[in-house]
Image (cartoon, rainbow, N blue to C red):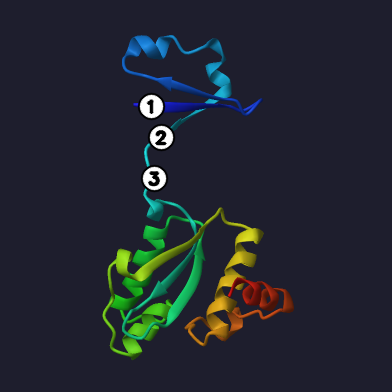
Amino acid sequence: MDHIYIHRERNDIYHKHLQTNEHQNSIPHQQHHRKQVTTQTTDKYTLSGIYKLTRPICNKAYVGQTGRNFTIRFNEHKHAFRNNSHTSKFAQHLIEHNHPFGTIQNTMQILRHHRKGPHLNTLERFDIYEEYITNNHINDTQTIFPNKLSDILLKAHS
């Protein structure tokens, strides 16, 4: 398996190919300063950030964020749907319009991978607003924060 070692002090990247335990013992003595990262592809649903849930039937969208992984958050929306709960605006929309709940691959679009925090909140507000101006959102109206900067950015993007 290929591994990348990132030297935290200098941001130097060292590539090492480890095949046996013998090779592992030959790693330089600075190993305690390095973080091992495998080059295997991470499943995008195991990360956190901003997501959009849509149903092709009506094309309405719910934009949300999570600091946990996307799969956990998706399953919470699904649980609210199965239990006819109003804890999920997306599930509530599906129930009210008699739409089925789709798979994560057909329902969830990852908009941004990011850690939880104030920056994520700002990005989420922008993405919600983008759906709002196209009259495509099902988020609570209390989550919509229009502003001139968002208008300028969206106009430049289109």
Q: Pick whichever, 75 or 110, lies toward us.
A: 110
Mark 2–mark 3 Cα distance, whole angstroms, equals 9 Å
Earlier in the chain: of badge 3 and badge 1, it is 1
> For the residue carrying disc 2, how many other residues have a C-alpha within 10 Å: few (<14), some (14-19), or many (20+)?
few
Q: Which residue is mark 3?
A: 42
Amino acid found under the numbered disc labelled 2: Thr
Q: Secondary structure at mark 2?
A: loop
Mark 3–mark 1 Cα distance, whole angstroms, equals 15 Å
Displayed quadrant of residue 83: bottom left
Mark 3 in CB contact with mark 1 (< 8 angstroms): no
Q: Which residue is mark 1?
A: 2
Mark 1–mark 2 Cα distance, whole angstroms, equals 6 Å
Q: Position of residue 113 (x, y in %)?
A: 51, 55
Q: Position of residue 111 (x, y in %)?
A: 49, 63
Q: Which residue is mark 2?
A: 39
Q: Position of residue 152 (x, y in %)?
A: 70, 75
Displayed quadrant of residue 16: top left
Amino acid found under the numbered disc labelled 3: Thr
Q: Secondary structure at mark 3?
A: loop
Considering every residue shown, the one lying at the far bottom of the view is: 97
Q: Position of residue 35 (x, y in %)?
A: 52, 28
Q: Pick whichever, 157 or 67, lies toward us.
A: 157
